[in-house]
Amino acid sequence: MGRLDNTTVLVTGGGSGLGRAIVSGFVEEGARVVVFDRSKEKLDDVAVSFGEAVRTVAGDVTSVADNEAAVAAAVDAFGGLDVLIGNAGIWDFNASLDATGTDELASGFDELFGVNVKGYLLGAKAALPALRASRGSMVFTLSNAAFYPGGGGPLYVASKHAGVGLVRQLAYELAPEVRVNAVAPGGMATDLRGPGSMGLADQSITRAMPIQDIMREHGALKMDITAEHYVGTYVLLASKEAATATGAVFDISSFGTPPRRDLG
């Protein structure tokens, strides 16, 4: 038996990278998963890889209607929703205040906060009735940048600090029916992209820097870290084993000291 048998989960940004690893780990633990992503190509691959254990929804996490459609897909296909994993996000590739033009800064803020903060808020709003009915939980992906400077530029770091406030406020408001927690991973080699308004939509963290080498050389555990290393904490928080956890942000970034500016 898996730790998530008979559990229905919605994962945003589940088409690749950490989101795809979460989907895989949850399916292995017996969950039924709705994967919400903006890339139909990635979703088609997910559907082929995981078969009847998943359903896919193409859409934008900043859209009210698309979030509602993703929740409806879970209810229609699997009879309800037990866990929301808010994972879709974008990075600013360490774009500093000084080096970023004013117009680019303004548009980048709107786009990055739209995905990283508004996307989580709208996902929570759409999922709330179903999660109340199941006495379920929400788990959001944050970052070591939710605790320390240097995990990105001011846009990204501010968005992840905002995520901490969102988790704590939602945990306060939604108790005792719905638990709300977050996971704060460190860097990893994925297809993580940036705001199109900053010219970063076609950039990925893997192509931009040797992130695995950086993590191995400067992380406290000196590991070749992959997205799969981070999945266990999501499984724990989604399971009944974490029945007393709410309002918590689990820092699993492997840093013993605040990261340097280039650690992502």
Image (tube, grey):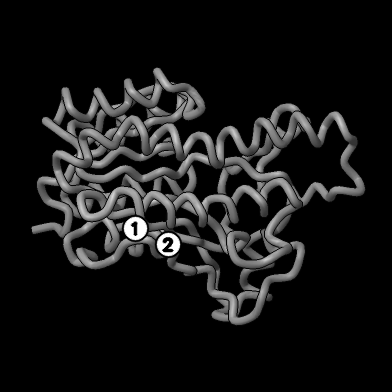
Residue at numbered disc 2: 230
Where the C terminus falls, by quadrant? Answer: bottom right
Look at label 2 and name its amino acid: Tyr
- Is 190 positioned to the left or the right of 155 in the image? left
In the foreground, 208 or 95: 95
Q: Label 1: few (<14), some or many (≥20) within 10 Å?
A: many
Q: Residue 218, relative to residue 52: is it above or below?
A: below
- Decide if residue 206 is on the left or right side of residue 84: right
Q: Nearer the viewer, residue 60 or 220?
A: 60
**Residue 213, percent from left and from top:** 67, 66
Q: Secondary structure at mark 2?
A: helix
Pointer 2 with pointer 1, Cβ within 8 A: yes
Q: Position of residue 69 (x, y in %)?
A: 32, 20
Query: Vertical placement of 51 versus 63: above or below?
Result: below
**Which is more foreground, mark 2 or mark 1?**
1
Note whether residue 128 is visible: yes
Relative depth, front residue between 76 and 19 = 76
Residue annotated with mark 1:
234
Looking at the rendering, which quadrant does residue 66 occupy? top left
**202 lies left or right of 9:** right
